[in-house]
Amino acid sequence: MKRLLISFSQIYLEPGAAYGFSDRLISELQKRISRKSLPSEKFHKKYPGAERLDFSLSASSKIKEGHVRGTEYHRSSKEVECALTLTFSANDRSWKRRSATGIKNLVSCVETVFANFELEVPASWNKSEILEFYLQDPERCVYPYGRSLARPTRLSDKSAAKTVTPKNWDKPTNNADDEHDPFNNPRQRSKRSCELMTEEYFWDCVDEDSPFGSDEGWDAYYEFRDWRRENPKARIRTYINAIMLGRARGYNKTLTSDDAIIESVRNPRKSFLGNEFDKGVLDVTIIAICLTQLIDEGHIEPAIKSFAEIAIARQRHKAFRPSKNRIKILNEIERVLREA
């Protein structure tokens, strides 16, 4: 009987509730759970022909115990997707302790699924051993940069997002204790961003073609601020490398070739970090991060401009079917990068 291919993916929906399990930890989990994972008669009967079992991880601060939200069989890909919601303690400020709790929760949830399907749990799937693996090097197992802030609501009134350079400008008001919304409050923008980002669409939080109009762009802005608050002197490249799970070197010009872009659109899961990001999401996130630094800090580090150039080249490719408006905006973002 063919062995089940087991994988883990992370899709976090609740703002602020997210475990940034790294590729290193995910690979270890997959290796441990797949050692003796043969489809049981019950599993085979319910999902005939299934070859893959994917655990889709989410988290919530509103539950006390992790649970299985449900399963769905994708016949075309022969994959069973099992959605797990893990507990998340927003009040625990120690990301190491919080992550350890999440790992314990994950191990128990997977065991529950295996028991329900009468699958044999490998001896290697041992909670103590997995925790020991995590505790040997927590920072390589979890990237604690994905936490979101409680953020202002995006306004649908585009007139509120017009670019206005206030008189007697000093510097943007970035007080973490205040509600921070530079898209609707020009005083919270750096002077340099006002000089370069003069078009209204730069501050539009509704239009999907705009850098902060999508959910991904909007989230990228506030998640970067959260990270910066805890890492005031760190270089932005460190943050981008963390987002890319330590694989930033792989995000290079080879990804801008016609073949690479077309393949990433046709087979998103096989693209660079395709198991972590949906199609085009990483590109949009990188662009937003670069503009975020300009908005908050008045400059863009030269070391990260190349990432944005790659992201723009990819997003502008015909395979992504960009609208004329989207191409216009991407061209203007490219101008901002050159001048910042």
Image (cartoon, helix red, strand yellow):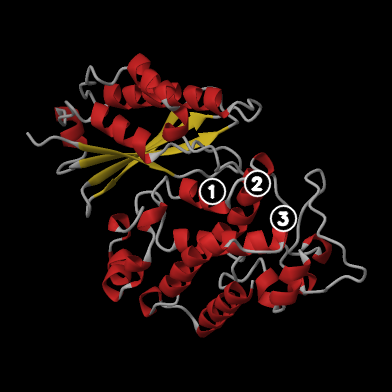
Q: Position of residue 321 (x, y in %)?
A: 41, 77
Q: Position of residue 161 (x, y in %)?
A: 76, 70
Q: Position of residue 62 (x, y in %)?
A: 60, 30
Report the quarter where the N terminus lies.
top left
Give the mark nearest the N terminus, 2 or 1: 2
Is 298 or 107 nearer to us in this picture? 298
Residue 318: image quadrant is: bottom left
Secondary structure state at the residue bearing disc 2: helix
Report the quarter where the C terminus lies.
bottom right
Q: In this view, does 333 lie to the left or right of 153?
A: left
Q: Where is residue 271 in the image (x, y as percent from the top left)?
A: 31, 59
Is residue 132 shown above or below 207?
above
Gap in Å between the C-alphas at discs 1 and 3? 25 Å
- At a point 35% along the width and 56% down the height, the residue shown is 250
Contact between marks 1 and 3 (CB within 8 A): the answer is no
Name which residue type carries label 3.
Thr
Give the mark nearest the N terminus, 3 or 2: 3
Label 1 vs label 3, nearer the camera = 1
Is 204 or 337 nearer to us in this picture? 337
Contact between marks 2 and 1 (CB within 8 A): the answer is yes
**Res 154 seen here:** no
Crowding near pointer 1: few (<14 within 10 Å), some, many (20+)?
many
Name which residue type carries label 1.
Tyr
- At a point 60% along the width and 54% down the height, the residue shown is 219
Mark seen at residue 153: 3
Q: Name the residue under label 2.
A: 228
Residue 337: image quadrant is: bottom right
Is residue 35 shown above or below 324?
above
Is residue 48 shown above or below 67?
below
Crowding near pointer 3: few (<14 within 10 Å), some, many (20+)?
few
Mark seen at residue 239: 1
